[in-house]
Image (cartoon, coloured by chain):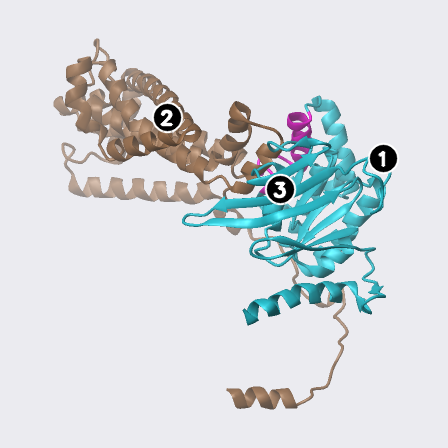
Amino acid sequence: MSVPSTGSPASSGPLLDVRGVTLQYKTRDHLVTATYRVDFEVHRSDRFVLLGPSGCGKSTLLKAVGGYMAPVEGTITLKGREIARPGPDRMMVFQEFDQLLPWKTVKQNVAFALTSGARMSTRAAAEKAMHYIDKVNLTKFADSYPHMLSGGMKARVAIARGMAMEPDILLMDEPFAALDALTRRKMQDELLQLWDDTHFTVLFVTHSIPEAVKIGSRILLLSPHPGQVKAELNSNGQDTVDPATGLPLTEKIQRMLFADQVEKVHD
Amino acid sequence: MTDVATANLNQTRPEFVRELASDNAFGVVEKPLTAFERVWNQGWVRKATILIALALIWELYARWLDNSLIFPTFLDTVDAFEEGIRTGGILDRAGHSIRVLLQGYAIGLIIAATFTGLAISSRFGQDLLETLTSMFNPLPAIALLPLALIWFGLGTGSLIFVLVHSVLWAVALNTHSGFKSVSNTMRMVGKNYGLSGFGYVTKILIPAAFPSILTGLKIGWAFAWRTLIAAELVFGVSSGSGGLGWYIFEKKNQLEIASVFAGLFCVILIGLLVENLIFRTIEARTVRRWGMQT
């Protein structure tokens, strides 16, 4: 399937189709509406970014795509099939450092996903695990336990694990948010390099505008409380100046999100 | 305070760049510790020192007291212990105690596993476990002895009954709280792999909760050991062969106080061995290697 442009016929269809999704969750004493009737389509090889301030339901949305919660309204379909439960066809990369299993080495962590999720034989899994560990430059640390690694290395293992499964779509929930600024920038570059290699499809959640512009090929802007679609923009990763407004992309996004907050203040 | 801050803001200080000292300029960057420091850093050396000091104090005090009926010396106790081993009495008794203990421990663990299994699979099971542990955990096993006597009579049956009681709640409580404290991220990772049911419990929950489970096993073992010895003291004799507790009781009746001490010594020794050899090894190979415990 080719990478469809915006006006392409619907015959090939989107990979992930989110239609009118309203998500609600319960806290101890409230019923919170996280998103309200959100629509978007992710196509093959998209680097699709969900961007918005905290409280816009972007992480909740990602969890719903992951199959951890069901929408109260609307549908989420992957390759035409409705998502019912978590599964290895939608591998997640989390922000937290404890996403790696501490009782397994780097290699075992990646291989375990393959043997239990993709039901691969132990040998094939080990080979494939090493291939992807190599890709994220951690060959030397294949036999280390997660607690011996730095935060950036842990994030790389999580990415290797996600990619090794060769999922239909890779879901990343602010994967670099807990890293320091320098490591974060390096990880962003590495992620783009990996994408250049295999053109995997990724759905990426972030609250950082520069990160969204750098990582994303398409950016969905969400407004907070509850999350609603504000805009969907294209990005080439360069923060180019929009001829219509004369603003660079980051500035344009900033104004869109900021304008919203000014209205809120006046209310 | 504010004055100083503004004054600093208004001054411009000159910038500077420095050459770093060359590598051979500084004296010590890294130097091995002295032999004594390295030896002293070993935990077992420090603990052995404490044990030797305690034995020394014991010996000196007993000599000063000079009353072997109340407080035999350390050397007398060691002699009695040796004697007990040579005539075979004490080792047989210890073996008997440990056999009973292992039976009770194993049954306790199986029941604890069943309860925790129920507790993590349903809310009702969780309520059941929480209610039962809060009822029975504070109840000392020894308090159940009279009941055990009526239900199971003298002998191994009642011993195992009180052992199960002392192991069960400690292990169930710790395992359950371990499961509850498994982070949400790790649960999501497990689900993401498509794991569910038994595979999810054995491959994600149990290893993730292993530090707590191990603590539960240790506490359960200590409870069981002390309960067993106490219970044997009261009614340990069964079909002619009692355990260590009964040995202590017998020797007291015969006024062989050094042998009483030797019996206690043996109880302590087995406790130390299990703690330091078995549990320490398990810890080193699992939770410490995984960085889940320092």
Label 1 is found on which chain of the structure? A
Q: Which of A125 and A201 lies nearest the eye of the viewer?
A: A201
Figure chain in brown: B
Q: Mark 2 belongs to which amino acid? A: Phe
Spatial CA span between label 2 and label 3:
32 Å
Marks 2 and 3 in Cβ contact (< 8 Å): no
Residue A84 in percent (x, y) is at: 60, 31
Horizontal side, residue B226 vs residue B176: left or right:
left
Graded by Cα atoms within 10 Å as few (under 14), some (14 to 19) or many (20 or more), the crowding at tag 1 reads: few
Q: Colour of chain A?
A: cyan
Q: Mark 1 belongs to which amino acid? A: Met
Residue B224 in percent (x, y) is at: 30, 27
Q: Which of B120 and A145 lies nearest the eye of the viewer?
A: B120
Q: Is residue A96 visible?
A: no
Label 1: which residue?
A1
Label 2 is found on which chain of the structure? B
Label 3 is found on which chain of the structure? A
**Where are the magenta residues, as a range?**
A99-118
Label 2: which residue?
B115
Spatial CA span between label 1 and label 3:
37 Å
Q: Which mark, by number, is residue A146?
A: 3
Spatial CA span between label 1 and label 2:
52 Å
The residue tagged with tag 3: helix, strand or loop? helix
Mark positioned earlier in the residue sequence (1 or 3): 1
**Residue A117 shown in magenta:** yes
